[in-house]
Image (cartoon, rainbow, N blue to C red):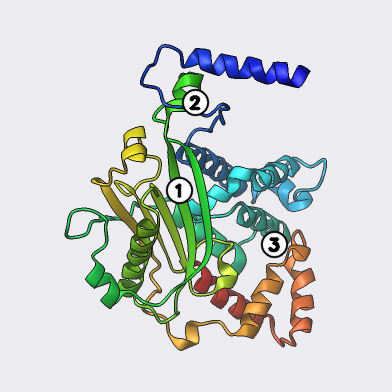
Amino acid sequence: MRKTLFLTLILSGLLFACQGNKKEVKEPKTVKVEKVNNTEKIERIFEEFKTLYSELLEFKDKSNFKKYGFGQGGPYHVWLTKVKNLKENPDSKLLIQKDVIARYLEQLGLAYVGSKGKETEVTKSFNKLFSNVISFNPVEKVETTSGNSNYDKSKSESEQFEFTIENSENSSSKAMVKGLSEYSTAELIKLPSLKRQILRITVPTEISKEQLENTLKYVVSLRTKEDNDLDEIIIFAYDNKNDIDSFYTFGKLIWAPNGELGNITPEIAKNNIRDNYKFDIDIKGKVGNIKKTDIPSKRELEIYNEIMSEKYWGMQEEDFLPIVMKKFNIKTEKELRDIHLKVMAYKLF
């Protein structure tokens, strides 16, 4: 009886909010309040990442860090706790759109513990990746000859390359142009939802830059034909499906108004207006220039994964490197470091 009365009060309140609007069509009886669109969340989480990275670079050379590391009770244990909280934050998965993941910041910090703040091949690789991302220059927006981003069919069929869609994620949120608190409940009900799709695809290692670019555009063409209501598409390209849970290794495409996420207005979402849509494409420099000797072997990948394993986090290099060398019958430390650098460079750059 109490449940029936409670539901009746909720429905009465919603009907009252919509009263006086004769053109109003039937509305949902419950309202799912959406958060502010992902652009704000991405920038917020990325700022947190950059702040923590800057703090690490500032204290890594200090004597008390070299002595205590991230030990409990030490001055830098708080930093490690913040990074772990960042890693566990559901929004941290959005960092992949900035080409980083929170786990790598933790690994860099623990690598500095092991090296007593000194630079190693591992720390240099991470720092190069992070500095490239933080000083990132916007990629040129690409328009097709027709003036919009509906990719030309004949070109896509002749110049696109084979690919496999390994993963597809769909999400939706209200198409808001102001903060959530600035909308009334009735306004939120009326707002249309935007549809976003994130795809992870694999392509052949030998693909060229032009073929990869055309393939990415071709995938957009296919997906929008299947679902004309898609408002944003993000595609990450890899040559190895084992990498799809990390940042892209071959290329990335964003299809959105002006090539930027977070620009979907209610009018665009409701009427599927695509006049200002553009491609924002980033392709790694190695694509099209990969030599056979650059490609890591199965054994080299296994060695790399072993070095990066969580079980060694926090250990000093002189303690865990001999373990890895013994496991894979590696005779010299130089050979081990060369393998690690080869795989790291292939994955990141």
Answer yes or no: is residue 283 visible.
yes
Q: In this figure, which residue is indicated by the disc labeled 2?
A: 180
Number of labels in the image equals 3
Q: Amino acid at mark 1?
A: Arg
- Determine crowd level at label 1: few under 14, some 14-19, many 20+ residues with C-alpha closer than 10 A: some
Under circle 2, the secondary element is helix
Precedes in sequence: disc 1 or disc 2:
2
Q: Nearer the viewer, residue 268 or 329?
A: 268
Q: Calculate the distance from the C-alpha at mark 3 to the C-alpha at mark 1.
A: 43 Å
Question: Would residue 46 appear left or right of 110 to someone viewing this image?
Answer: left
Q: Nearer the viewer, residue 305 or 256?
A: 256
Residue at x 74% of width, y 74% of height: 321
Residue at x 33% of width, y 73% of height: 209
Q: In this figure, which residue is indicated by the disc labeled 3?
A: 115
Under circle 3, the secondary element is helix
Precedes in sequence: disc 3 or disc 1:
3
Q: In this figure, which residue is indicated by the disc labeled 1?
A: 196
Residue 107 rendering spot, x and y as whole percentages: 66, 58
| Mark identifier at residue 267 | none
Q: Amino acid at mark 2?
A: Leu
The residue most toward the right is: 73
